[in-house]
Image (spheres, grey):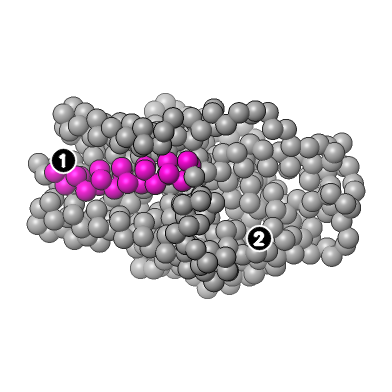
Amino acid sequence: MPIGVVLGGAAAVLVVTFIALAIGWKVPRLQDGPGYRGAGRRLPVRGFPATLGVLSLFLVGGQVVASLSGVERAPGRPTIAPVLVWVAFWLVVPFASALVGNWYADLNPWRTLAGALGIGRMERVGLPDRVGLWPATLVLMAFTWLELVSPRSGDPATLGVAAIVYTALLLVAMALVGRETGLAVFDAFTPYNRLLSAIAPLGRRADGTVVWRGWLRALPVLPEWPGLWVFAVAIIGTVSYDGASGADWFRTLSGDLGTTTWGRTALLALTVVVVAAAYYAAAAAAAALGGEGWTAGRVAQRFAHTLVPIGLAYALSHYFTLIVFEGQQIFATVSDPFGLGWDLFGTAERRVSYFITTSTPVWLLQVTFIVGGHLVGVVLAHDRSLQDFGRSAVRSQYAMLVLMIALTSLGLLILSG
């Protein structure tokens, strides 16, 4: 199918959806937050959340040992570190959060370690409202730089050192500002999983009861921490760079700049800046059309939650095959975590099965992710505009619609490249 047809069809879907919302969706329906239904169920296993934390801490510790063991690996035997970091921790856990809720809060190995050491008992509760997600955004950019730019991103020793440095950073932060505050402000993966988990239909009450709250219901009531929209933009921008850097048209545009580490670093930052500028321009237009009293910065914060499903869609479409195929290596490496020729569980010789033999079903699924994520973004933006702009709601969203079409086209161009 010609890419022009795909782009035109996707744009038409978004425009038709926008018109349908303008005609049939007259009052905000999602702004009240989760509407928990039913009594819910408590976790069937007492201490299950704590068990998750201990298990994840054990895995992180094992990853560090596996990375820095220094012993000579058996030929053709990788260690568990790369697949554990780049597939399980970075992709599978956050994607699962979008389905079943924020279990990362229990899985977080650094929270478990701080608790075991008695670190961070005194919380500076007002810090997130003042500092927000700016430190976490910088950490997220550093992590993605290690993944996408560093020539040693697959080196187990590099990952081991990075894990030690990151652990030290978070322990110091939690000791200074409190356990929960330190993770909320300085741990990139705590807000990342929290944002994606707001999509999930499942939530938990304070007593641990798992309840059905409905899809997307928690997104509109996310706390508007300073830097929230920049963090969401960074998710989209980094994935966009990762996908675009493998496309012929991007390599032609970047030229020699894409052949050096400093050049790729600049391109990564530039991609995030371009996406941020586009979103901020759309927010400025919405502020101008929405009525008096609105600024571009305020609108950018208020509509930041509409970027979350787009970020998830970009990541799902781009990393789908990585999870499906490369993720299978976990079965082999768990039997031989140090690459020494062990076979603890009888799976060390298991190889990747490329069971999808044609690209067509993958392409269709990726297009569905991209278009679907932006459709959800259009719905969320329309619902928020009804609450904030009233009679000017539809008019205020013209620029946001153009942004959604542009981001959809970018995602599809990256896939086609």
Decide which of tag 1 and tag 2 comes sooner along the chain: 2
Visible residue check, residue 38: yes
Question: What residue range appears in magenta?
Answer: 393-416
* Above or below, 354 relative to 107: above
Q: Which mark is residue 167?
A: none
Q: Main secondary structure of the magenta part?
A: helix
Quadrant for the N terminus, please: top left
Name the spot of residue 283 as percent of width and height, x first: 24, 55
Q: Nearer the viewer, residue 321 or 390?
A: 321
Name the spot of residue 128 as percent of width and height, x first: 40, 64
Q: Nearer the viewer, residue 314 or 125?
A: 314
Which residue is denoted by mark 2 in the rendering?
A: 153
Name the spot of residue 278 as percent of width and height, x first: 30, 56
Q: Residue at x 83, y 49 (%)?
A: 77
Which label lies toward us, 1 or 2?
Answer: 2
Amino acid at dot 1: Val
Name the spot of residue 280 as percent of width and height, x first: 28, 58
Where is residue 116, by image quadrant?
Answer: bottom right
Amino acid at dot 2: Ser
Q: Which mark is residue 394?
A: 1
Q: Secondary structure at mark 2?
A: loop
